[in-house]
Image (cartoon, rainbow, N blue to C red):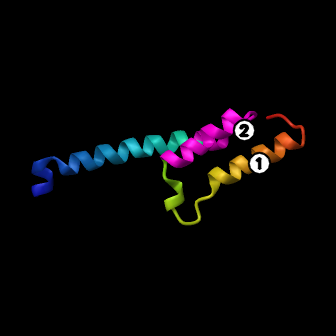
């Protein structure tokens, strides 16, 4: 009751909505093949902003970057 009256519940819901939107943006970044080092840096920044290192077993960002590196070293494009 105190949380609701003090606005904490609404603040938590707003935070969760923002984080969900940020998560969707991150997923989109990881799903997009990077063709340059700048693109891979964008993925690393997204990884950092989402604090994915705190999630056990969360390696989609690094798997995505590794796939980009493999593709680039093999001479392929997106």
Q: Main secondary structure of the magenta part?
A: helix
**Image quarter for residue 42?**
top right
Q: Quadrant of the N terminus?
A: bottom left
Q: Secondary structure at mark 1?
A: helix
Instruction: Give the number of marks.
Output: 2
Label 2 crowd (10 A; few <14 / some 14-19 / many >=20)? some
Q: Position of residue 55 (x, y in %)?
A: 51, 62
Tell me what residue is drawn at x 83 percent, y 43 percent: 71
In the rendered image, the vertical position of residue 37 relative to residue 7, given as above or below: above
Residue 30 lies left or right of residue 77; in this view the side is left
Q: Secondary structure at mark 2?
A: loop
Q: Which residues are magenta?
A: 28-49
Residue 74 lies in quadrant: top right
Disc 1/disc 2 C-alpha distance (Å): 8 Å
The answer to whether marks 1 and 2 mark residues whose Cβ atoms lie closer than 8 Å is yes
Q: Mark 2 highlights which residue?
A: 33
Picture residue at 66% right of the left edge, 42% below the top: 31
Residue 78 on image: x %, y %: 79, 35
* Label 1, residues with CA under 10 Å away: few <14, some 14-19, many ≥20: some
Q: Could you tell me residue 30's position as x and y percent?
A: 63, 44
Q: Which residue is mark 1?
A: 67
């Amino acid at each position: 009751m105190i949380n609701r009256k003090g606005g904490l519940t609404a603040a938590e819901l707003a935070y969760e909505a923002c984080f969900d939107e940020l998560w969707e943006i991150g997923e989109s970044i990881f799903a997009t093949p990077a063709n340059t080092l700048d693109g891979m840096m964008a993925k690393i920044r997204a990884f950092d902003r989402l604090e994915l290192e705190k999630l056990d077993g969360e390696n989609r960002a690094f798997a995505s970057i590794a796939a980009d590196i493999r593709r680039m070293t093999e001479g392929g494009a997106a």
